[in-house]
Image: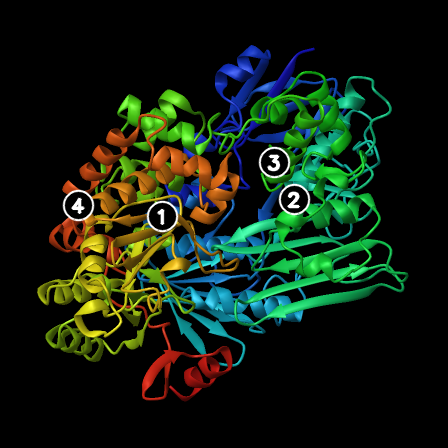
Amino acid sequence: MQITVVGEEPRFAYDRVHLSAYFDGTPAAELAIASRERYQELGIETILGDRVEKIDRVQRIVTTGAGFRVPYDMLVLATGSKAFVPPIQNTEGLGCFVYRTIDDVLAIESYAKKVKRGIVIGGGLLGLEAARALKELGLTTTVVEFAPRLMPMQLDAVGGRMLRSRIESLGVTVRSDTNSTGVVLDEHRRVKALALADGSRIETDLILFSAGIRPRDELARESGLAIGARGGIVIDDHCRTNDAHIYAIGECALWQNKIYGLVGPGYTMARTAAGQIWGEAHHKFEGADMSTKLKLMGVDVCSFGDAFGATEGARGMSVVDEYRDVYKRIILSADGKKLLGGMLVGDSTDYDYLSALARDGSELPAVLESLLVAPGEARPQLALGDNSVICSCNNVTKGAICAAIQGGVTELAPLKKCTKAGSGCGGCVPLVTSVLKAELIAMGQTVSNAICEHFDHSRQELFHLIKVGRIKSFPEMLHKHGRGLGCEICKPTVASILASTWNEHILEPKHAPLQDSNDYFMANIQKDGTYSVVPRVPGGEITPEGLIAIGQVGKKYGLYTKITGGQRIDLFGARAEQLPDIWGELIEAGFESGHAYGKSLRTVKSCVGSTWCRYGVQDSVGLAVRVELRYRGLRSPHKLKGGVSGCTRECAEAQGKDFGIIATEKGYNLYVCGNGGMKPKHAQLLIGDLDEPTLLKMIDRFLMFYVRTADRLQRTSVWLENLEGGMDYLRKVVVEDSLGLGAELEADMQSIVDSYRDEWKVAVEDPEKRKRFRHFVNSDQTDDNVVFVQERGQIRPARQDERRYLRVVS
C-alpha cells in the first residue's frame, strides 16, 4: 500500500501536548514524533509545507497549493483545529498572537523580547499553558477569562478558586468573569491595551488568544462533506464521513455531535480509521476517556470521569486544604459502590489510581474517605482488574500490559513502545511502572530500580557511573548512559550527584537548567512568589553585630523576619531581583548561604554546653560550629540536619536529627538516621565515647555512604529501614570498615570540604549569574503583582480576598 502524507507545516509530526517544553529549553526539532528516516523506513512519502487546496471526490485526487496532484483510494482528513479568536475589534494588530504551533511559539518569543507586558485571553488548559510561556519570557502576565472561574470545563467553583490562588501566587494576575470588547492599538497598529465591557481597559504590549478551538473543516466543507451545525466533519463509528472513501480523525472530526480536543481520542480515531482501511471491520470508535492530568505552571490539575456529578443520583465527597491550596473531590454512585469521577487540584498523587478505578468500576474500600485522605504510596493500585484502562491516551488496559510483560517485555521503554502505554501525555508512567514491577515480582524475576525511563540505572548506579567515569555534565551522562531528553526526575537527581561528587557551582551554564526552582534561585520560593533568605548561623552562635546586620537588611528591604527551629533567622518576602543585593549585604557582614533551599546540610543545632550551662560536660557550641562548617554545602539525596547536645539533657534534640552528637564525660556519642517531618524518627546509637577526630571520621563515612547509596529524595531514616541488615550492617560498614571503603569515603568528604565555595558569593560576583535574577529579561522593572499586608508589626502575603480589595483601593 502506498501512503502519502501532506502537511501544511514545514515539519514532520510533532508533540503539541508538550509544546510549552520549548520554553524550558527543548529545541523545536526534539518535539518531533518521528524522523524523516522513520517515514522513509515505513515507505511513506511526505509533502511538507504545502496545503491541500482541493479534493476532487469524483476522480479521487487532492491538489495542493504548489500544484501537486495526488490520487487516492482512501483519504484521511486530520486537519485538526485552529485557535478561536473572539470577534472583537483589532485582533489583527501587531502583538496579537495565537498559541497552537511551533511557528506561533517562535513568533511569540521573538516579539516578547521587545515588550514588558502580556495578556492571555482564555483561562482554560491552553490559556494557562500560554500564560506560563509569557511568564517564562519575562513578561508581566494577566489572564482574562470570560467564565466565573479558571478551567470551567474541568473544575467546579472550589477547584477553580484553589487553582486561581495557586496561579496568582506565582505572580500572574487573573481577571475572571471578564468580557473584552476590543484591542486598543497605537498609531503604528501595535497593541496598546485590551478594552473591557465595563469601560475599563488593561494596558499591555502583547495579547495571546487562547479562548478555545474550532475544527478546521473548511476543506471538507468546500468538498461537499457533511458538516455539523456548529462545525466539524461528521463521522460514523468507523470514523468514515458521508463519502465512503474519506475518513476524518482528531479535532476536525465530529462524532455524535461531539468534538474531542485531547490527544487520546485522536489516537483512538486513528487506530479505528487505519483498521477499517486495512479491512479489519471490528475496529470502531465508541467515544473516549476525557480525563486530563496536567501540570499548569507547576500546579497539578486533574479531572476524570463524571467530574461534575451529572449521573443521576451521583453524590460527592470533598477535601479542601486552604493552607496548601489543595482540593480533592470524587463523585460516587448513589449506592456508594462505584467511583464515577473526580477532580484534583494541587496534588495529583492519586490520579492514576482513582481514574483507573473510575474506568474499571472496581470495588471501593469500605471506608470511602480513604480515597481522599490515604497516602498515595498506600494505595492498592495493583488490585485493579485486567480490563482497567491504565493509559487513557492510547486505551491500554492493565491486561494488555501484563500480557506484554509475560511475553518477555521486562523494561519500561520497550513496554511503552510495545503497548503504547505512557507514550501520550506521560501521566500514567508511574502506574505503568508499578504494574511492570509487580508483574515481574510475581514471575519471580529481579525488578529493575531504574530511576526513570531515560536511564536503566538506580540512583546508586548513576552515582557510581558519574564518579568512575568522571562525568561532569548531564548531557555527557545522557549520551553515555541514557536516552531521550531527561525529565524532572533524572535531571535534578543527576545535578545533585554531580554536586556531591565534583562540587561545581549549581548555576554554571551546564548545571543551571537541571535545578528545581529553589536551587535555581538559591532561595526558597514562598506561596506568594517571593523568596526567603536564610544566612548560615553555624551552631546557632551569632554576634550582636551579626544580629544588627540581619536586622538592617530586613528593615532596608521590608522583609518579614522569624527565628527558625534550627537556630537561624529567616528573611521572607524578597523578590527575585532583590536576592543578589540582599546576599551582597549579608556577605559584607560576614554571612554566607545557609542552603535552606537545597537538598544538603541545613543546620547543626546546639545548646550552650559547658561554656555556660552548669550541666554541660563538653563545648557543644564550638563543636557544632566546627561540624556545620565542615559539612556545609554537601549535596545529598535529601536535606540533612544535625545537632550537638552538651549533656544527656538533650536541649539540642540531637536524637531527632540525621546525625546527632551527645556529649559524655569520655567524649561524644554519635546517633544517626533520625528526623522530624511527616514521619518523625528517633535516631539510633552508632558508636559511643569518641574523641573529636574519630567522631568526624565516623560522620564523614556515614554521610558519604548515605550520599552514595540512598535513593532520590530518601531521608536517612527511610534509607536505614531499607538497608539490608539495618543498623548492624551500617555499623559494620562505617565503624568496622567491613567493605574497605573507609579511607575512600573520608577522602571523598575531604574533597568536598576543600572545594567549598559560598554559592551566594559566587553568584553575586559573576555578572552573568546575576542576570538570572532579573524579573524581566529586557527591563529592570520589578514585579508589581506582589501584595503584602501588615500584621503584628511585619508584612505577610495578602490573602485572595485582601488582594482583590487592595487592587480596588489602589
Residue 109: give its label.
1
Q: Nearer the viewer, residue 251 or 526?
A: 526
| Whole-number angstrom distance, CA of label 3 to CA of label 2 | 10 Å
Which structural element holds mark 4? loop
3 or 2: tag closer to the N-terminus: 2
2 or 4: tag closer to the N-terminus: 2
| Whole-number angstrom distance, CA of label 3 to CA of label 1 | 26 Å
Contact (CB < 8 A) between labels 3 and 4?
no
Disc 4: which residue: 756
| Whole-number angstrom distance, CA of label 3 to CA of label 4 | 43 Å
Q: Nearer the viewer, mark 2 or mark 4?
A: 4
Disc 3: which residue: 424
- What residue type is disc 4 on? Tyr
Disc 2: which residue: 262
Q: Horizontal placement of 626 versus 430: left or right? A: left
- What residue type is disc 1 on? Glu
Q: Horizontal placement of 336 versus 666: left or right? A: right
The answer to whether residue 686 of the structure is visible from this angle is: yes
- What residue type is disc 3 on? Gly
- What residue type is disc 2 on? Leu
